[in-house]
Amino acid sequence: MIKNSIISLKLINSAAFAVQDELFKVGLWFEGSKLAETEIYWCALSPFSLSDADGFFTHCVSPVQKILGFEQGHIYIPSFVLSQKIWKKRGSIRDVIRHEYAHSLAHYYPKLISKSDFKNTFGDDYYTYEPIKMKKKAFISKYARIMPMEDFAETFMVYVRRKGIMPSTIKNKQLIKKWQYISSLINLINK
């Protein structure tokens, strides 16, 4: 997206339908899928605590957020990101939505995410708010290094974008393990 751009509802809807089609192709969008319970909403700005977020998923909602109309279990895409005006360039709206659907997956399938294989794959529990201690090449993006939930979401984002086909450039064993984890997670959801 272009720096200082306003995101329209039309753009969000178009991107959402495209991503939902990709989720269908990887086996995550079907009748009865819990991901289909996630609505995508346009909002003017992110809550103050998330003022630099291109999008966000609401695992839980504070009383103030509830008053502002936010609900648990949904994706919100702000029309404008405050930090964008100063320095930040937004990524693609589809990537933002793909990334947020990963958080939705963790929210609606918590038993699958809470297993020890998540911790073994991503370096810690999903809700650990500490940076992960792995080599830089074990991450799909710089943002993925922040904490396990973002590592999972970033890896998921690329997985969905690539329709499950791992890029030949991925050589790191830990990153391959993360990719395989997402694939096996999808298989478990489809059983």
Image: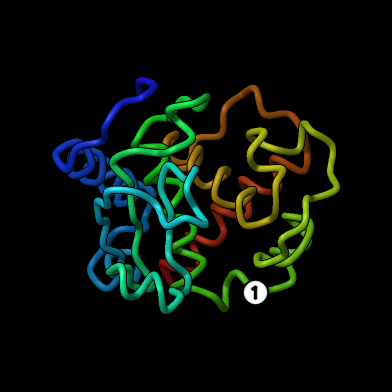
Please tell me whether mark 1 sits on a helix, a strand or a loop.
loop
Q: Could you tell whether 29 is left or right of 138 in the image?
A: left
Q: Is residue 63 above or below residue 56?
A: below
Image point (34%, 65%), residue name: 74
The front one of 169 and 92 is: 92
Give the crowd class for mark 1: few <14, some 14-19, many >=20 residues within 10 Å. Answer: some
Residue 163 in the image, given as x and y percentages of width and height? 41, 39
On screen, residue 5 above or below 81: above
Coordinates of residue 143 in the picture (x, y in percent): 63, 39
Q: How is the image coloured?
A: rainbow
* Lateral position of residue 75 relative to residue 59, left or right: left
Residue 127 x, y percent position in the rendering:
66, 67
Write down the residue under mark 1: 114
Q: Is residue 119 above or below residue 93?
A: below
Q: Amino acid at mark 1?
A: Ser
* Circle count: 1
Judged left or right of residue 46, residue 173 is right
Q: Looking at this rendering, what residue extends furthest in the left direction?
A: 10
Residue under the image location 40 percent in, 73 percent down: 64
Q: Quadrant of residue 9?
A: top left
**Observer-nearest residue: 93 or 154?**
93
> Which quadrant is the N terminus positioned in?
top left
Quadrant holding the C terminus = bottom left
**In the picture provided, is 138 more to the left or to the right than 109?**
right
The image shows residue 59 at horizontal and vertical percentages of: 47, 70
Residue at horizontal 79 percent and vertical 56 percent from the top: 123
Q: Residue at x 78, y 39 (%)?
A: 173
